[in-house]
Image (tube, rainbow, N blue to C red):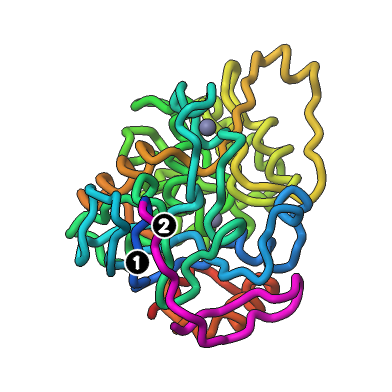
């Protein structure tokens, strides 16, 4: 099979012909139709995140936003059959028995294995996955539409859940990128009033197309005042950008009792005034990807047309150029590799 392989951290992926994987008794073999390229893939390939660097298998086939068709199933698999349309997310495996798995928080499982980090992922013609952690892709979604939901869509959905977003509340989304544009649509679908913030007017125009009720360019003078002028500030400020300035602004813009939802990861620590935190009784919540139940909910919402990831397709062979464009900050939407 064709595969893009990371042999050495911070080196380009190599295009190789590898043997097709054999599914174990509890696994399915999937013919990959589409695989999204997530910013995490680039960080992993560069070895930039120390927490993941130590557990990254080499050589590795990256990719954790996988959609495809079941090719064959292991001896013990009863929930899938060849021809089923399926997806595979970041969580390749969780134990099911630890305190986190037992309390609906499998994203915290200490025995978790990660697709495209600890086991081979979807930048290949075939991938094997645990049948227990493989999800069905609704017929209403194409493989290209479904793939980015496996990580990007799932991540913002879960963040909205932990922020306890409720209809009628105000949500401000900081950063209109791959995650941000999905957060805007999700917020609207959940009945919130949604504002979008970015440094780029084109992205703010795009935010309006995604349903944002109002936008603020954060390079304007005193942007926190402009945000506060929208009904006293948001109940939830969700930061999807990896910029510390966005976090500062988000905290200054929140209404009293509001929630800062940490989604975008910054290279430097963010600073928080405990005085401001206490006097505003702010809450800070964070969220990593999502559970299988979250993923099913996201896919169902997308199948109903409430959530559409904007993407462009590229062939698997273009992965190194996609990484280069990502590094240079030249990508505007999600890239989905097609096979
Ligand atoms: Zn991801
Ligand atoms: Zn567990």
The residue that disc 1 covers is 30
Residue 290 position in % (x across, y down) = 47, 40
163 to the left or right of 321: left
**Which quadrant of the figure contains the N terminus?**
bottom left
Residue at 50% across / 52% down in the picture?
A: 90
Image quadrant assignment for residue 259: top right
Front residue of 271/7: it is 7
Which element carries disc 1, helix, strand or loop? Answer: strand
The residue that disc 2 covers is 129
Residue 159 visible in the current orientation = no
Precedes in sequence: disc 2 or disc 1: 1
For the residues bearing labels 2 and 1, Cβ distance under 8 angstroms? yes
Residue 127 position in % (x across, y down) = 43, 67
Q: Is residue 26 above or below residue 68?
A: above
Q: Is residue 201 above or below residue 213?
A: below
Segment colored magenta? 1-25
Q: CA distance from mark 2 to mark 1?
A: 8 Å
**Residue 16 covered by magenta stretch:** yes
């Amino acid at each position: 099979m064709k595969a893009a392989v990371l042999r050495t951290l911070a080196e380009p992926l190599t295009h190789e012909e590898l043997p097709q994987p054999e599914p174990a008794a509890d696994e399915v073999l999937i013919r990959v139709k589409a695989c999204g390229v997530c910013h995490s893939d680039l960080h992993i390939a560069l070895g930039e995140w120390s927490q993941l660097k130590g557990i990254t298998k080499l050589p590795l086939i990256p990719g954790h936003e996988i959609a495809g068709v079941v090719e064959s199933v292991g001896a013990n698999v009863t929930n899938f059959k060849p021809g089923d349309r399926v997806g595979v997310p970041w969580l390749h495996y969780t134990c099911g028995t630890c305190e986190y798995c037992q309390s609906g928080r499998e994203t915290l499982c200490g025995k978790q294995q990660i697709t495209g980090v600890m086991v081979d992922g979807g930048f290949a013609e075939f991938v094997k996955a645990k049948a227990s952690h493989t999800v069905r892709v609704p017929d209403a979604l194409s493989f290209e539409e479904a793939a980015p939901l496996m990580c990007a869509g799932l991540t913002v959905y879960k963040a909205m859940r932990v922020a306890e977003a409720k209809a009628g509340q105000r949500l401000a989304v900081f950063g209109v990128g791959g995650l941000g544009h999905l957060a805007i649509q999700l917020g609207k679908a959940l009945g919130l009033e949604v504002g979008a913030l970015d440094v780029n007017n084109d992205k703010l125009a795009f935010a309006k197309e995604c349903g944002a009720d109002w936008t603020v360019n954060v390079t304007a003078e005193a942007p926190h005042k402009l945000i506060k002028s929208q009904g006293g500030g948001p109940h939830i400020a969700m930061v999807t950008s990896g910029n510390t300035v966005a976090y500062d602004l988000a905290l200054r813009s929140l209404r009293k009792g509001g929630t800062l939802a940490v989604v975008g990861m910054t290279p430097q620590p963010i600073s928080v005034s405990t005085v401001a935190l206490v006097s505003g009784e702010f809450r800070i919540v964070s969220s990593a990807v999502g559970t299988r139940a979250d993923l099913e909910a996201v896919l169902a919402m997308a199948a109903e047309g409430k959530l559409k990831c904007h993407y462009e397709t590229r062939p698997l062979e273009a992965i190194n150029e996609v990484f280069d464009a990502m590094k240079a900050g030249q990508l505007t939407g999600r890239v989905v590799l097609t096979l």
